[in-house]
Amino acid sequence: MFQKNMLADFRSGIVVFLVALPLCLGIAMSCGVPLFSGIVAGVVGGVLVTAFSGSKFSVSGPAAGLTAIVITSIVQLGSYEAFLAAVIFAGVLQIILGILKAGSIGNYIPNAVIKGMLAGIGIILIIKQIPHLFGYDKDPEGDEQFIQIDGENSFTELVHMVNFVTVGAVIIGIVSFLILLMAEKPFYKKDKILSTIPGPLLVVIFGVLLTIAFKGYPLLSIDAQHLVNLPTISSFEDLNNNLVSPDFSFITQSKFWVIAFTLAVVASLETLLGIEAVDKLDPEKNESNTNKELFAQGIGNIFCGALGGLPVTSVIVRSSANINAGAKTKASVVLHAVLLLISVVLLPDLLALIPNACLAAILIMTGFKLTKWSIFKEQWKFGYEQFVPFVTTVVVMLVTDLLKGVCAGVVVSIVFIIRDNIKFSFECSKEIINDKQYYLLKLPQQVTYFNKGYLINFFKTVDENSKVIIDGSINRSINRDSNDVIKDFIANSKKKNIDVELFKFEI
């Protein structure tokens, strides 16, 4: 069993590494910070956060959702070094949140919204990677924002890429898809030799070989701009030069603490959403300890800030790739982080031959697995009360970002909850006795402001010359506004010859 798990984790670790590498570098590029900062975050998230994490399959690293905050914060503080100091204190605040058990916030996100978030990320991943698949690499990998840093948006980028198609990249993309599809076939998975080679690794090998083969042909040649862009580290001195130290000179300024607090809250929310999503994808249905996860993320961000890395969160794309690749233990996450560091330090020349097109194919396949059509059909079958929040989350995510999409989905879900509370909280009936119409209105335990409209509409339906019995036997509290509605009805009931009886209820 141990050997079987070790092989599965090794395969998964390689897959996650291939997914994480372009994202770590791309997010760093999007933020305008040293590329090695993304690698540092990936290594710290993969090793240190995983060691303390309450999740079995979650992968932590630099998150695209924090890009806007990073860019804005660096501008406000004037330097990346000052921002790193804020990252350290954000980590301290996350540890405090974990100790205070703030991780339970994630339990209140509706399932429809979590499913919508996963589907939305899948669609965004597909849309964002299509240009890279065709050799149009103007927008960095890892950018998930609708409005891109190159001035375009997710959809106009698809239009512009038509004018910049690279034939060699398209061929590599097609070959990559064929390999990935082949790796999903039963014959591949059952073969003793082939089953040990992850499909994404085979894609990268063929991508590198085709890149080398295309060099002598102008039409097919892949330029350096279409290959993985790596920081140059050829010695210990280079490694040391790529590590940025934090600057604490802004610690006495209020804007410093606003940034630290904002970063802690947003990073924690993204982590909690990520953990909820991972638990939904987990075939073993493990329930992660979210408070422990916040504590782990806090430790990770303290070290990221100290070593010059971007802030980390639990990230869904890498976590889903880990689960889909068949990971069994946390070892796969640690392995991906070790591979990140070793490859950048020892194999930069080899990695620099990997075309973005084959990595885009891997990410697009990951996106398809996150946004299966069956998920949309499932939510539709559950009814519009589930489908509308689900679709709202997806759509808002596409045109804004992850957090805004989730917030929109939660708001729509709350609207349905309030509507149901108003609609089904009261028991009312009517019956004719001795030629007189009787109405029975049973008040629920809690009558709130939201019930005011229902009471007004109900009293409007009461006929003249009738009797209304208001039963408050189970009522514990009533909002002032709703109570005033009942008072007004009683005060005006004599004009319509309506007899009102209060049972175990006082106004």
Image: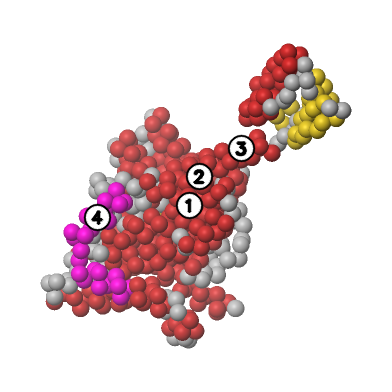
Q: Nearer the viewer, residue 71 or 111?
A: 111
Q: Earlier in the sequence, mark 3 or mark 1?
A: 1
- The location of residue 428, given as percent across then percent down, is 75, 34
Disc 3 residue type (three-letter): Arg
Mark drawn on residue 419: 3
Cβ atoms at labels 2 and 1 below 8 Å apart: yes
Q: Residues within 10 Å of mark 4 (few under 14, many from 20)?
A: few
Foreground mark, 1 or 4? Answer: 4
Q: Is residue 193 above or below residue 124?
A: below
Q: Residue at x 34, y 47 (%)?
A: 146
Q: Earlier in the sequence, mark 2 or mark 1?
A: 1
Quarter of the rendering containing residue 237 = bottom left
**Is residue 163 inside the magenta stretch?**
yes
Write down the region rendered in magenta: 153-176
Foreground mark, 3 or 1? Answer: 3
Q: Earlier in the sequence, mark 3 or mark 2?
A: 2
Q: Residue at x 30, y 38 (%)?
A: 75
Residue 58 in sight: no
Distance of label 4 from label 2 (alpha carbons) = 29 Å
Q: Earlier in the sequence, mark 4 or mark 3?
A: 4
Distance of label 2 from label 1 (alpha carbons) = 9 Å
Disc 1 residue type (three-letter): Met
Residue named by callout 4: 159
Residue named by callout 2: 409
